[in-house]
Image (spheres, rainbow, N blue to C red):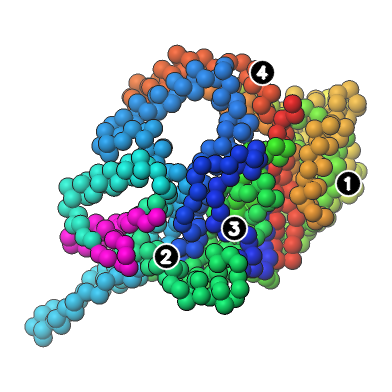
Amino acid sequence: MIALTVSITSSPTWAQTGLASRDARDQRGGQELEFESAVPPASRLLPSDTYAYVRIRNVADLKVGFARSSLGQMLDDPAMQPFVSDTYQTLSATLEEFASQIGLSLDELLSIPQGQVAIALVPGAPPEAEPAKPSRGPEEEPETDEEIARRLQRQRRQQNRFAVVLMVETGKDNTSSARMNELLEQIGELSQRNQFVSDTEKIGDHSLTTWRRARGGQQTEWFQRDGMFVIGLGRRAAADVLERWNDSDAPRNRKEAAEEAKDTDSKLVEISGNLSSNPDFGSVMTRSIGAEAETPQITFFVHPYAIAEKIISRSGSAFFIMPIVETLGADKIRGIGGSIFRGGEVIEGIIHAHIVINPPRDGFFGVIRPEEVDPTPPEWVPADATSYMTAQWDIATATDNLTQIVDRFAGEGSFDRFAEDRIQARLDISLKEEVIPNLTGRYVGVQRYQLPAAWNAVARLDALQVRDVEKARELLQRAKTKLPASDMRAENVGGAEVYFLANRRKLPNTLRTPERSVFLIDDYLVLADSRELVEQVLRARSGKTPRLIDDTDYELLLSELGAKLGGEKPFVLNFARDADSYRVLYNMAGSDEFAGTLSRRGENNPVIAKFADLLNRQKLPPFDELRKYFNVSGGFGYDEPGGLHFGLMTLRPLE
């Protein structure tokens, strides 16, 4: 099962998040994993101003969670084993050339990580001081404008560098450590062949190996400590981690401070200046932790504005671009992050995400105006829908703020020229005076899978609730009179007047041809791209086919979502049948059309040719044999004083 959470709130300390270093345990089944971590979490070893970060808490635990997931169990089904095994062999053969260069097979590479794995984008260290160049003599020509521009550009790039840190924990496994050392030796030999110079320095009790170009520029460094290999791409990237790790061991910083504070768990004493002490990171992680039985296997964090600011500063156009970015309110985003868990008993998987945003809500965030929504599906939503979503929005305020943004950058009156005036001229309808005021702000979206299999086999329907049905009907009639008869053709379908729109776009035979229409059902204005879906919706409305509102799967999911909401009022809610979602890709992968396409493209690409041959050798079993591995999933979102919070989760199939 999966749950997604996005939220903006105040920032607690890292210790309060509860993500202290812990040994890996499979808490879903009570099975204790053999691996125990002896190193701090990556967030304690990275700088506080880390730009982006992804961490796997324990690779072994992640594998257990995936094996217990619906997808993992489906791939382990005896009917799928020939295909899965052949796919893995094909992938191994495809990577054989790469494996021969590094001296390790795919199996050996995948066996290296035993515990924590993390990768982070961090600020690059400032460039090393260069010897001062002698000033130009009186007879020498002064720098040209082009030379000055190139020098300044080079300085901007050097001062706004990014660096990358990779952490791989092998623990006490001698085989994994030996393979990692072998991999690094191969990288070292490759570096020397590419004119890199190797060097070693001592930082505390540990050695740091560096590969750098003889004339400066690219630099890679690495060290090993307590079963953790840390590789840095960029000057001092790995050295900074090692120095911070050494500082964390200092008696005053750790043991003595913990004893003075009478802290029974000294691991929760923060190290100054690391990512875990970043209040925005702490706020994200606090909201991204589920119950103890749902300890996340993956956590992530990114500071998008800081990354954008760095990139813009490198370009030399910051004075022009930054005011635009700030006017849009991008500088209000303080961080986006969350966590992923898979392998639960009832809730199979959860994805949490969290957004930290500074008030007030202006600029782009002035368009984000969510309101509490009624989660009850309209009676016309069919029970066999692949997915259902509903949301509530203050559409009038959002439109006003969007108008201000467009006019701010494109000139006064631009929104009216781009939208209002064009609709008025074509349909004799005022968007601002007739359409927007008649909308309640509630949106309903329905998707439904329909044969034959195609990339666009999922038909969709979008509906907006209206205040005055007769007013909406009058606007439809007015639009029809303004358009050619062939562009908007009225037809009675199941007792409802449906206007089918002309489709002038030709699609290949392998794709579903959309049949777009617009009509009113109850108090909703509906846009659809499938006649079949329209007919099914109208049958559900008349009671001739089951409705989602009466569906037991929907009731069960709504109950579980309610527990995750914890009393909060959602502004968006989503329901999906996972079997249909997977079936779209599954049927496409097993179709003759897809196999033929791969075969044709494989004529000029040996990699594609191998996978085309795989599909010819191994035919997938019928998807109906695999439906038992999938249940339903759902998501939610609610508004908070500091921002927005979202969630998405999947239920384990009932036995």
Q: Which residues are magenta?
A: 201-226
Asked where in the image residue 107 lies, by quadrant, the reply is: top left
Mark closer to the chain start, 4 or 2:
2
- From mark 2 to mark 3, how far is it between C-alphas? 18 Å
The numbered mark at residue 245 is 2
Mark closer to the chain start, 4 or 1:
1
Foreground residue among 224 and 211 = 224
- Residue under pointer 1: 471
| Residue 495 is inside the magenta segment | no
Main SS type for the magenta part? strand
- From mark 4 to mark 1, how far is it between C-alphas? 46 Å
Visible residue check, residue 515 = no
Residue appearing at x 25%, y 46% in the figure: 185
| Residue 219 is inside the magenta segment | yes
- Type of amino acid under label 4: Asp
Q: Is residue 484 left or right of residue 307?
A: right
In this rendering, the answer to whether 310 lies above or below 299 is below
Figure quadrant of the N terminus: top right
Mark closer to the chain start, 2 or 3:
3
Mark closer to the chain start, 1 or 2:
2
- Residue under pointer 4: 624
Mark closer to the chain start, 4 or 3:
3
- Type of amino acid under label 1: Lys
- From mark 4 to mark 3, how far is it between C-alphas? 41 Å
- Residue under pointer 3: 19
- From mark 4 to mark 2, how far is it between C-alphas? 53 Å
The numbered mark at residue 405 is none
Figure quadrant of the C terminus: top right
The x and y percentages for residue 363 are: 64, 66
